[in-house]
Image: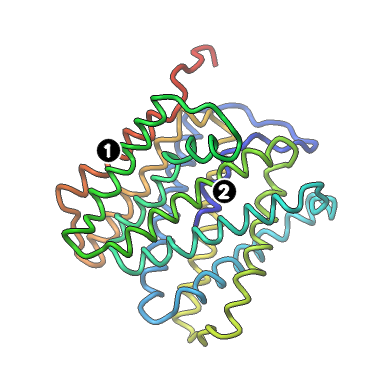
Amino acid sequence: MYALLLLKTTPPRMHYQAPRQSLLRGLALLTLSALLFSAMGVLIRLASHTVNNETIVFMRNTTGSILLLPLLTVHGTGLLKTTVPWKHAWRAVVGLAAMYGFFYAIAHIPLSSAMVFTYSSPVFIPLVAWLFLKETITPRMMIAATLGMAGVLMVCKPELTGNGWILMVGISSSLLASMAFVTVRSLSATEPTTRIVLFFSLISAAISAVPMLWAWHPLNSHECMLVVGAGVLATLSQLAMSKAYALAPAGKIGPAAYMAIVFAGLWAWILWGEVPDQLAVIGTVVIFMATLLCLPQRQSSAE
């Protein structure tokens, strides 16, 4: 899942002509990405009733890799040449670990609450960047991180619902996704987005294949449709997000990604009758506010 959020990077350094900027098209594509991502969550939830988490993650990554392989026909095998393979490997490891945790959360808590874990990860990015990249951390960032943690607690309510284990998994997933974000930020200084995405898909598929030696769940046609469909939706969401951030500044359209939580809530209400309580809604709003604090304080008005 988390490959999707990690594409907020600089444009590729290949022979590339940036598309004409369009705030409206960027917002539309990012909203579409959120819709596709929430629909992926629905398929993961349905599949998790009979398919184990290891098989779901493997099939999602394998499907994504197959769909992205045509990039090699467009850019050639030179797309696989890199001087920082260890960075790509690290980004894949932490991103994949976050995916395992996120999919586990989808299977055990309301869908909209699971989405909150995914979209709380930007709150922790400044802290991770401070630890690993020695970037400056400001009081504003500390306030954002504190608010984000409070929002997550409001959504999960571990003491009231016995979801302490899910809370640990969810927060760990958010922190791991933040580490992946920061790694992508470092990679984007020398690597094109297409290479970053392709390496993540291929390495994640290879690593997630290992548990299949003991955890493979034979799939019937219905289960196969669900997990392959999830992989297709995740990949399409990823591509839509990548295009959206190429069309408009992240600081202006980024909050639209939170529509995934709204869409997930609608899916969950229609399919399972799940209705978030008042505390969960407040927690979601708090996380949204915390993320806004992480955005640049000043945007250029002359764009």
Q: Is residue 69 left or right of residue 303?
A: right
Residue 280 percent coordinates (x, y): 21, 49
Amino acid bearing label 2: Ala
Front residue of this view, candidates 118 and 176: 176
Query: Residue 252, located in which quarter of the rendered image?
Result: top left
Residue positioned 54% across, 39% down in the render: 131
Q: Secondary structure at mark 2?
A: helix
**Relative to 229, is 89 above or below?**
above
Dot 1 alpha-carbon crowd within 10 angstroms: few under 14, some 14 to 19, many 20 or more: many
Q: Is residue 86 left or right of residue 221?
A: right
Q: Quadrant of the C terminus?
A: top right
Front residue of this view, candidates 236 and 79: 79
Residue that mark 2 sits on: 180
Query: Residue 167, located in which quarter of the rendered image?
Result: bottom left
Residue 114 percent coordinates (x, y): 34, 57
Q: Is residue 173 left or right of residue 280?
A: right
Residue positioned 31% across, 33% down in the render: 289
Q: Secondary structure at mark 1?
A: helix
Amino acid bearing label 1: Val
Dot 2 alpha-carbon crowd within 10 angstroms: few under 14, some 14 to 19, many 20 or more: many
Residue that mark 1 sits on: 286
Residue positioned 69% across, 47% down in the render: 194
Q: Earlier in the sequence, mark 2 or mark 1?
A: 2
